[in-house]
Image (cartoon, grey):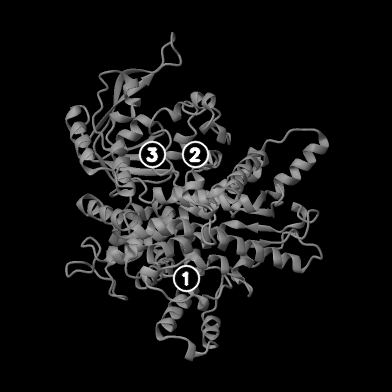
Amino acid sequence: LYATVYGITTKVVHVAHPVPARAILSGSGVIDAPHGFDNLQNKSYLPFSSLWRTVRQIWFGNDTGSLKKQAQRRKSSTSLRLLTGSTKNPAYDHFKNFSGEGVFTADGQDWKAKRASVLHCLLRNGKTDQLLEVEANRAADSFEREVQFAKNIYNQGNRATCNDNEKNRSSDMCPVMNVVPMLQRSTIGLIYRLITHHNVEFSPGFDNNEIEPSDAGDYDADQSDSFTSSTSPRSSLSSLISLNNESIPSDNWCKVDPNDLIETAAKKPLSNVSRDNISNKGKNEEVKALLPTYLDSVTKIRMVILAQSRSFWYLVPRWAYRAFSPMFREEERTMGPIREFARLTCQNALPGSPLALLNERTSHSAGKDREKDQMSGLSKDLLDEAITLLFAGQDTSAATLSWTLHLLSLHPEIQQRAADEVRSVLDTVKSGETSNQLDNSTKVTKNLITQMPYLDAVIKESMRLYPVAPFIVRKLTTSITIPTETKTAAHPTQSTSNGAISLPEHTFACIWIYALHRNPKLWNSPDEFIPERWIDPQLQQKDQGQKEFGSYMPFAIGPRNCLGQPLAQIILRILLARILDKYVAVDPKFDAVLKLAEKEGVEVNSKCLRKDMQAGFTVLPSNGLKIKLVERDSSL
């Protein structure tokens, strides 16, 4: 990633320290630190603690008057905090063919208007809060169905199955599966339904013709428990890898033949199906048929955009790149299915859904002054936003869960502790007076995950080691002065302010989140997977990074942080709780090494088996994540 060239004479600074990182990202231009360097560690000193208060107001409905008073106090409290700021442009111009002028790449007043609209339609929409738990559990159901089908395929060639009894439940009797595409399909279904209220199931082999249409007011996702896989979900073939390493050809990855789907719908007696139902089925078939190509394309575009930023074409004007670059033609071929999936998503959005509400806002509506998509007539701003929401919604969740399962498969004792906590909470609820909290569609709730502190620590530690976006870039719109950090011989562990570093205007600042999260000055044993560091008071004291704001930022910080963070936090915890309650994640290589080490009487360092990160502006495990998912003994 250091190979990115921002210009021949452009100044570039690489940042892996919380003080300059938060100064750049929060928009605090000049920091004189009159009370010493340690004063900068105070969270209230910087303005972007106000961002969380704003989000909290939108999400939980805090008192507006008190927030205004707090803002006035902050405005007059100090002359040292100068809101000068930084911008994404032109550092993110190479993303604009992907996400257009959506909230991810927009700047200035246009960005402010679009961000406010997305926050209003997505987070203040009452139905989003209501549906989030249901859809997260529904995504977990989808994932379980794919896992079961993969096991069924494997068991067809074996007399014993990995689920029949305790003996055959051992990992030796279960197939190795690439769970990354499984998680991607489950999470894209979640985010699609959440922003459209279109009740479609993306599970391979599931017959969407069984879903009755409903308007936004009657949107009902309670059918998740009745979902069955009576037919063979072909896409699961891509995730099944036999133990003799004979993998399924990539040509068969998640393919759904539109003709087969139409033929299935045609078998239904028309006398029993309304015209609206026929229309709904057509929507289901069309969007489901496009899904495999869409997922392949979003996986590829991550690498295409990164490759462009490393090439000669990044330095030339955009018109030259579009006119002469073969890379642009490849990018356009890749973007075709992504744009078409976003068009279908916008067209299928029901009244009252976030996308439908967004289309009514002046920031995204197809007004006379707004550019329109030529193929659909939709506002291009709305289409750009749909592309961003779909990608960010599934990519963050699927990638984080993949890395978390990878780490847990290399640390069985940590995985067992997390699973025991989940099982304990669920068993208590099922047997207690609060058992009515759980119904067929919501097996794990937001209230329940708040009772799982170790599960929360596991996800935090996974995102510390493997943040989805390893670095972000900003262009400074004004100069920023930052105090330097030095250590004296008498006090080698204490930092003092001694001089300053000036970052001039127009400098490109690369904030290395990956390096921040592994900075040995901030984290004790920075490369180790230690969830206990987040809940053990003694371990917390050893981590300066937990005390200093800006040391941990998996969703970035400041006004341009991740919009969907409140949703992602809930989705990740519900999905992981469901997975750990159902399965034991086993890494076959680690399992084999562990058995050999036990035989030889030596210790095993699991870090040598950690996977590399796949290149891209967001990161997935290289070559997928191939593990075994063994069903837990219900008696445990």
Give amino acid for label 1: Val
| Of 16 and 636, the residue lying toward us | 636
Image quarter (top left, top right, bottom left or bottom right) of the N terminus: top left
Give amino acid for label 3: Ile
Q: Mark 2 highlights which residue?
A: 464
Q: How many marks?
A: 3
157 relative to 142 in the view: left or right = right
Q: Mark 1 highlights which residue?
A: 200
Q: Position of residue 607 (x, y in %)?
A: 63, 38
* Dot 2: element: helix
Nearest to the eye among marks 2 and 1: give it: 1
Looking at the image, tell me whether mark 1 or mark 3 is earlier in sequence order: 1
Q: Position of residue 376 (x, y in %)?
A: 31, 75
Residue occupying image coordinates x 50% and y 34%: 518
Q: Mark 3 highlights which residue?
A: 511
* Dot 1: element: loop
Q: In whole angstroms, how far apart are the C-alphas of marks 2 and 1?
A: 34 Å
Residue 511: image quadrant is top left
Q: Position of residue 411 (x, y in %)?
A: 65, 40
Which residue is the extreme one toward the front? 433
Q: Residues within 10 Å of mark 2 (few under 14, many from 20)?
A: many
* Dot 3: element: strand
242 relative to 96 in the view: left or right = right
